[in-house]
Amino acid sequence: MYLPPIKNPLSVQMLGKCLIRWYRRHRRPLPWRDNPTPYRVWISEIMLQQTQARTVIPYFMRFLERFPDVNELAAAPEREVVELWAGLGYYIRARNLHRAAKLILEKHGEFPRELKAILELPGIGRYTAGAICSLAFNQVQPVVDGNVRRVITRLEGMESGKNDSFFWNRMSEWIPARHPAEFNQAMMELGATVCLPSKPLCSLCPVEEACKARRLGIQDTIPAVRTKHAVQQIQVVILILEAGGKILLTSIRKVAFIPGEWGLPCSRIRSGESGKEAAEKLCCSILGRSLPVKPYVRISHSITYYRIKAHGFFWRGDLGSAELRKGDAFRWADRAGCGRLLTSSLFRKTLLKYGASNVS
Ligand code: SF4
């Protein structure tokens, strides 16, 4: 299909037309794009934070199957929502979804349509609220995510960084009164599939002729890549305590960045401390006494910028009169089913190795 080139200076009207036409033809078939109700847009946008679309698809399908609407989500126990989130990480998002679902029903009875009301819901910022208003209600509300920032930076050929309000203002100026949802999605889709962070596919771009960066030959160098967070190496000890065929889980977060509601007892190994010493100390903090724990596995795992060396220790036997401290923070789970409750893949890996090891 022939797309008319945009003549410089950039024509806002033509930009919108070209992008929307391109989007209709080239958009990826993603399940949340069919029937974009506010609920479906909301769930998908929250899942897509920090996670790629192809990874999100099966999670989205499962979530919608179990919680097809805001009523079902609000009525579910929080634990079930978090369990279904397992693998997506950043579990605060699942908790906020659940809280927001309850608030929506209490305050509005149905999903609110106004930007202000949507912004008041937990876990929803300016981007997500704008996405819901435009994608679900077709309101003229701009959205700015990382992809949109990159596309604007290149279209405008900006070599120095701009603050957030610059990008929001640009999108407010550019968004057309007709088809605002498609325009927003076209900008995001262009950034996700063509105007890639490195080596943008300019020959496939519908607005190539209007792109300043392309004209100046700087499309590969802007926007400047942000310096990455320094990687941190840490060592942790993970305990599997098994009594009567049940495994002890805890909700106490001694290693704050490991996500999830329920985990295996775990703590950092301090410098100068051995894995065994850390395991015994952890055991004492839970049971008030030490147990003869044995090492059985070492696992390497990454969470964001943490590179973790996990030392797995186990103990299996009869606990007799030993008492758990802070009882509410612990639960015994069947060995066969407790993997389902573990929302961190580090703990799931540790448990899997325990099941697979000859540790008797
Ligand atoms: Fe991005 Fe290239 Fe299109 Fe410019 S021409 S917007 S750099 S893909």
Image (cartoon, rainbow, N blue to C red):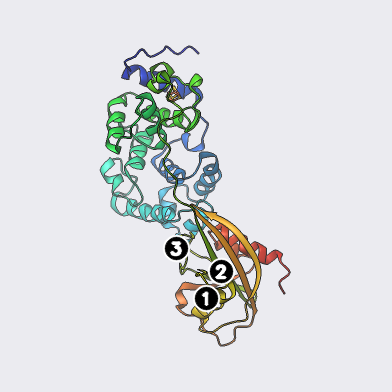
| Residue 173 as seen in the image, left or right of residue 99 | left
For image coordinates 36% across by 50% down, the residue present is 123
Q: Is residue 5 above or below residue 299?
A: above
Q: Residue at x 50, y 73 (%)?
A: 330
Residue picked out by circle 2: 237
- Residue labelled 2 has its Cβ within 8 Å of some atom of ligand 1: no
Q: Nearer the viewer, residue 25 or 270?
A: 270
Q: As shown in the figure, which amino acid type bears the numbered disc 3?
A: Ala
Amino acid type indicated by mark 2? Val
Question: Is mark 1 in CB contact (under 8 Å) with mark 2?
Answer: yes
* Distance Cα–Cα, label 2 vs label 3: 14 Å
Q: Is residue 138 above or below residue 87?
A: above
Question: Residue extending furthest front?
Answer: 272
Residue placed most toward the observer, 138 or 257 = 257
Which badge, 2 or 3, comes first in the chain's sequence? Answer: 2
Quarter of the C terminus within the rendering: bottom right
